[in-house]
């Protein structure tokens, strides 16, 4: 039996169990608002009697390892997620097998979007902008093309206020409200659109401090589980400096990563790695906490101490060069950007973080235009997809400093 046949058979079997469970609950529950119910004895017995739940641990691990190694990219990567949702034993082994993006270079579960990108290479993504609805959608590419159908990752909605502008970021493209369980953070600008703050709805590391200016919010309003407050944890401050050349010159961009120590870009350096979402979100996304492990928690605690004692990582836009023949400022995007735009940028570690005063060559985040309302976004360690997306959103906002 092929792996695809195995996964399909597993889906059919557990799908029938789930449908039987829903029918049983509907007969018992009667009318009223929907609520979360525990699995009944019949459903639990069906799970225990399933041939998939009774596989020997050694055989199960071998099967899951081969599936994880064979399904390396989306959309086939969804088979790995399906395996993690079969039962507790499958979930436990899957979370041990699947590595974080830093080591694997793969995005598997939603929590991967809060974890640092790969150390070797970059993750190539793109952003689609909808001017009418003022929404932005982040995808990861499925091919080597600049843009394809893509695998959806994150969505953001622009919300104008009298004194600032917010970009609400969500895991769900159809629900970008702040009260949603899928809300994971936001980008907030000042009145002029020259200074921005990226807020994480969840603690970026153990002991993170909530912003004093946060507004009280409760997630999971329609759930039976206890309400868990989500705060504003500042993870980055972005500023655009005054451009003396006006629109003809490149923007000067500066990013202070509050949750990442400066040593993260050095050999052997570490950045904080989130391992789970709050429990209130597990009902909607049962697979988002699969990276909980002792080693991950130790790394997170170590990173927290380092962040408190060491200087913060500072990123700045790489200085472009003036091209005499083209009569414009140019950067080498290695074919990932095709349209000239003031929004285009490459971020590198500032010389403040290095032993010398020379600019760092390794590009950590690059963003650029490739078509009408279409932009590429490539990122790597030590920043995450969420942080990268938020930084790129700041480039869309109107800036008096660049005019």
Image (cartoon, rainbow, N blue to C red):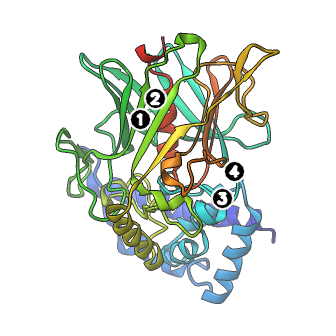
**Where is 366 relative to 385, above or below?**
above
Q: Which residue is mark 4?
A: 74
Q: Is residue 306 visible?
A: yes
Question: Dot 3, crowdedness within 10 Å: few (<14), some or many (≥20)?
Answer: many
The disc at residue 394 is 2
The answer to whether marks 3 and 4 mark residues whose Cβ atoms lie closer than 8 Å is no
Please tell me whether mark 1 or mark 4 is closer to you in this view.
1
Location of the N terminus (image quadrant): bottom right
Mark 2 Cα shell of 10 Å, populated few (<14), some (14-19), many (≥20):
many
Kindly identify which residue carries mark 1: 238
The CA distance from mark 3 to mark 2 is 25 Å
Which mark sits nearer the N-terminus, 2 or 4? Answer: 4
x 37%, y 56%: residue: 204
* Distance from Cα at disc 3 to Cα at disc 4: 13 Å
Q: Residue at x 63, y 18 (%)?
A: 341
How many neighbours does mark 1 have within 10 angstroms: few (below 14), some (14-19), or many (20 or more)? Answer: many
Residue placed under numbered mark 3 in the picture? 105
User: Between residues 242 and 130, which one lies in front from this camera angle?
Assistant: 242
* Tag 4 secondary structure: loop
Name the front one of labels 2 and 1.
1
Q: Is residue 316 left or right of residue 121?
A: left
**Whole-percent x, y for residue 160 in the image:** 32, 19
> x and y percent of residue 70 in the render?
77, 65
Q: Report if the CB atoms under discs 1 and 3 are less than 8 Å apart.
A: no
Q: Determine whether label 2 and label 1 are within 8 Å by CB.
A: yes
**Disc 3 or disc 4, which is closer to the eye?**
3
Helix, strand or loop under label 2: helix
């Amino acid at each position: 039996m092929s792996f695809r046949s195995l996964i399909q058979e597993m889906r059919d079997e557990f799908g029938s169990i789930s449908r039987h469970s829903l029918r049983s609950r509907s007969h018992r529950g009667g009318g009223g608002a929907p609520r979360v119910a525990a699995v009944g004895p019949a459903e639990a017995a069906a799970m225990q009697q399933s041939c998939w739940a009774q596989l020997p641990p050694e055989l199960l691990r071998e099967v899951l390892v081969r599936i994880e190694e064979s399904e390396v990219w989306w959309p086939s990567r969804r088979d790995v997620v399906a395996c993690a949702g079969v039962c507790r034993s499958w979930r436990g082994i899957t979370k041990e097998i699947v590595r974080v993006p830093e080591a694997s270079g793969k995005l598997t579960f939603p929590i991967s979007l809060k974890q640092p990108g790969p150390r070797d290479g970059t993750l190539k993504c793109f952003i689609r902008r909808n001017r009418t609805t003022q929404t932005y959608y982040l995808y990861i590419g499925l091919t080597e093309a600049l843009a394809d159908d893509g695998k959806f990752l994150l969505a953001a909605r622009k919300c104008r206020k009298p004194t600032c502008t917010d970009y609400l970021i969500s895991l769900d493209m159809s629900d970008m409200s702040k009260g949603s369980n899928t809300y994971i953070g936001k980008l907030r600008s000042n009145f002029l659109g020259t200074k921005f703050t990226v807020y994480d709805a969840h603690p970026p590391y153990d002991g993170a401090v909530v912003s004093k200016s946060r507004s009280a919010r409760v997630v999971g309003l329609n759930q039976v589980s206890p309400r868990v407050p989500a705060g504003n944890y500042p993870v980055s401050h972005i500023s655009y400096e005054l451009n003396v050349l006006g629109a003809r010159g490149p923007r000067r961009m500066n990013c202070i990563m509050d949750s990442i120590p400066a040593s993260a870009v050095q050999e052997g350096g570490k950045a904080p790695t989130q391992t789970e979402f709050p429990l209130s979100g597990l009902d909607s996304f049962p697979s988002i906490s699969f990276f909980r492990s002792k080693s991950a928690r130790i790394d997170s605690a170590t990173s927290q101490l380092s962040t408190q004692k060491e200087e913060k990582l500072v990123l700045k836009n790489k200085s472009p060069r003036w091209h005499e023949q083209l009569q414009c400022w140019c950067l080498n995007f290695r074919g990932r950007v095709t349209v000239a735009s003031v929004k285009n940028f490459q971020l590198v570690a500032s010389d403040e973080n290095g032993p010398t005063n020379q600019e760092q060559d390794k590009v950590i985040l690059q963003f650029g235009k490739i078509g009408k309302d279409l932009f590429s976004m490539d990122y790597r360690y030590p920043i995450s997809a969420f942080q990268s997306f938020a930084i790129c959103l700041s480039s869309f906002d109107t800036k008096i400093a660049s005019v």
